[in-house]
Image (cartoon, rainbow, N blue to C red):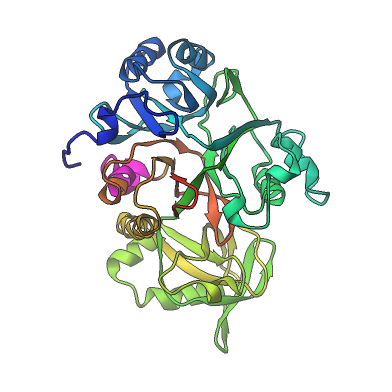
């Protein structure tokens, strides 16, 4: 990453006018938790009381995780605390440079002062979720707010939602569907926390380590703008699904021509370069249209309406393919390739659109798949470097996840191989 001058937010005083928003972030890489906390405290010395503290810790601290929030709360002031353990940590160092730290000790802490914000933290026991076929009120009750606080008439009046889920949760898709049911217009961003062998959860909430799911509704004067980069590029034409059973696609069509998915793919392979055919062996996915109408409504240069899903099996007898998504007749699908170049190009385009909407976010949160990072780009700091190309000074924090949460085509989904970014902006600025 090219060197650059420390950003202006590093030199501003921590205590400003009561109506002045600020973000302060710190990153520590000490091996011991105690030393890492002391480093964080030094970097954030003098910080005024924050409204929200976000804490992301590497899995190497798993055995000491119950000590983390009590130690931080002795040194720093915040009304609410939220975070998790991760397979890696994203943070901004004292010089202002963002980093993605994988497979090594790292602790990232971000303090936010948000005048005019309404913050509603919540913790959910995912073992006792309401019925998805019942009323929405029990789902709203999980968030600890009455129905009027979750308006559904327009996105402009709805809160945003940070959502972190423990890896022990067995009903994450039900949870996401239920929260969309409870607050359909609320943008939801986050991910599944990292796994470990210690006898406790992976989530940080207020002063405790918990399981289930935790999060925070952010409303009032502030909101989260989503950028969801799935890291793929399409190959071949868009097909319509003609026959499907559960998650298996049996037949697709293009115009009047019908064939098996494998036959359709074989025709596409003849048009690919040798390098692309090599990628097909390990990096082939299927883009699933959210409805037969969503692609027609999408702008030609707008975000994709495809949800990228794993291809998990092939039946050589009939050319059918099994997909990591329930399929139905009438859906549109398109084969996708994943590589570093496609990931860079897609993320640059999405970040450019976000900059056009809101050029100066207060902070950015990155929830990245463990399959991204150096393993995808061949070098460290791939996603944060692309973010800094567009937003030269924004503080960046986050975590590497076992699954990323973010919206595609108006609904919230659990993703893989994805970078789900949340840009914290003033409401009305985007």
Q: Is residue 144 above or below residue 160?
A: above
* Drawn side of residue 13 relative to residue 294, left or right: left
Toward which corner of the image does residue 89 lie, by quadrant? top left
* Drawn side of residue 212 relative to residue 146, left or right: left
Q: Position of residue 383 (x, y in %)?
A: 33, 46
Q: Which residues are magenta?
A: 372-386
Quadrant placement of the N terminus? top left
- Judging depth in this view, the residue of 119 and 237 nearest the camera is 119
Tell me the residue at 41%/44% (across/down).
Answer: 371
Q: Is residue 382 magenta?
A: yes
- Judging depth in this view, the residue of 275 and 72 nearest the camera is 72
Question: How many discs mark residues in the rendered view?
Answer: 0
Q: Position of residue 271 (x, y in %)?
A: 35, 77
Tell me the residue at 69%/41% (across/down).
Answer: 171
Tell me the residue at 44%/19% (across/down).
Answer: 61
* Drawn side of residue 7 relative to residue 321, left or right: left
Quadrant placement of the C terminus? bottom left
Q: Position of residue 45 (x, y in %)?
A: 34, 16
Residue furthest right as drawn? 134
Q: Is residue 385 magenta?
A: yes
- Does the image show residue 103? no
* Drawn side of residue 100 relative to residue 132, left or right: left
**Predominant secondary structure in magenta?**
helix
Q: Is residue 92 above or below residue 182?
A: above
Q: Is residue 126 above or below residue 411?
A: above
Q: Position of residue 326 (x, y in %)?
A: 65, 60
């Amino acid at each position: 990453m090219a060197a650059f001058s420390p950003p202006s937010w590093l030199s501003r005083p921590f205590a400003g006018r009561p109506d002045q928003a600020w973000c302060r972030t710190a990153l520590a890489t000490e091996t011991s938790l105690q030393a890492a906390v002391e480093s964080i405290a030094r970097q954030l010395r003098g910080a005024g009381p924050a409204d929200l503290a976000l804490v992301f810790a590497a899995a190497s601290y798993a055995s000491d995780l119950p000590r983390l929030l009590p130690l931080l709360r002795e040194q720093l002031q915040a009304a609410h605390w939220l975070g998790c353990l991760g397979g890696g940590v994203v943070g901004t160092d004292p010089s202002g440079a963002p980093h993605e730290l994988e497979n090594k000790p790292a602790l990232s802490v971000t303090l936010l002062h948000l005048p005019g914000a309404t913050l509603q933290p919540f913790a959910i026991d995912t073992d006792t979720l309401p019925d998805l076929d019942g009323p929405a009120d029990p789902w709203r009750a999980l968030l600890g707010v009455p129905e009027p606080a979750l308006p559904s008439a327009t996105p402009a009046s709805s809160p945003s939602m940070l959502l972190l889920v423990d890896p022990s949760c067995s009903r994450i898709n039900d949870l996401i569907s239920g929260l969309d049911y409870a607050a359909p217009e609320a943008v939801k961003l986050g991910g599944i926390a990292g796994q470990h062998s210690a006898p406790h959860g992976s989530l940080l909430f207020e002063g405790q380590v918990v399981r289930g799911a935790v999060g925070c509704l952010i409303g009032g004067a502030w909101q989260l703008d989503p950028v969801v980069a799935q890291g793929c590029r399409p190959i071949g034409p868009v097909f319509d699904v003609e026959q499907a059973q559960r998650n298996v696609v049996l037949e697709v069509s293009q115009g009047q021509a019908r064939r098996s998915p494998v036959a359709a793919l074989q025709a596409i392979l003849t048009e690919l370069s040798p390098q692309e055919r090599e990628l097909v062996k390990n990096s082939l996915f299927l883009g699933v249209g959210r409805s037969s109408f969503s692609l027609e409504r999408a702008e030609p240069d707008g975000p994709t309406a495809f949800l990228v899903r794993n291809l998990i099996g092939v039946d050589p007898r009939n050319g059918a393919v099994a997909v990591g998504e329930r399929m139905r007749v009438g859906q549109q699908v398109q084969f996708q390739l994943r590589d570093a170049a496609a990931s860079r190009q897609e993320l640059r385009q999405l970040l450019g659109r976000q900059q056009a909407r809101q050029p100066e976010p207060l902070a950015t949160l990155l929830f990245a798949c463990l399959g991204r990072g150096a393993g995808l780009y061949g070098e460290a700091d791939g996603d944060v470097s692309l973010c800094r190309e567009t937003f030269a000074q924004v503080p960046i924090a986050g975590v590497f996840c076992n699954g990323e949460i973010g919206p595609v085509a108006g609904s919230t989904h659990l993703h893989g191989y994805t970078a789900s970014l949340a840009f914290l902006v003033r409401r009305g600025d985007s």
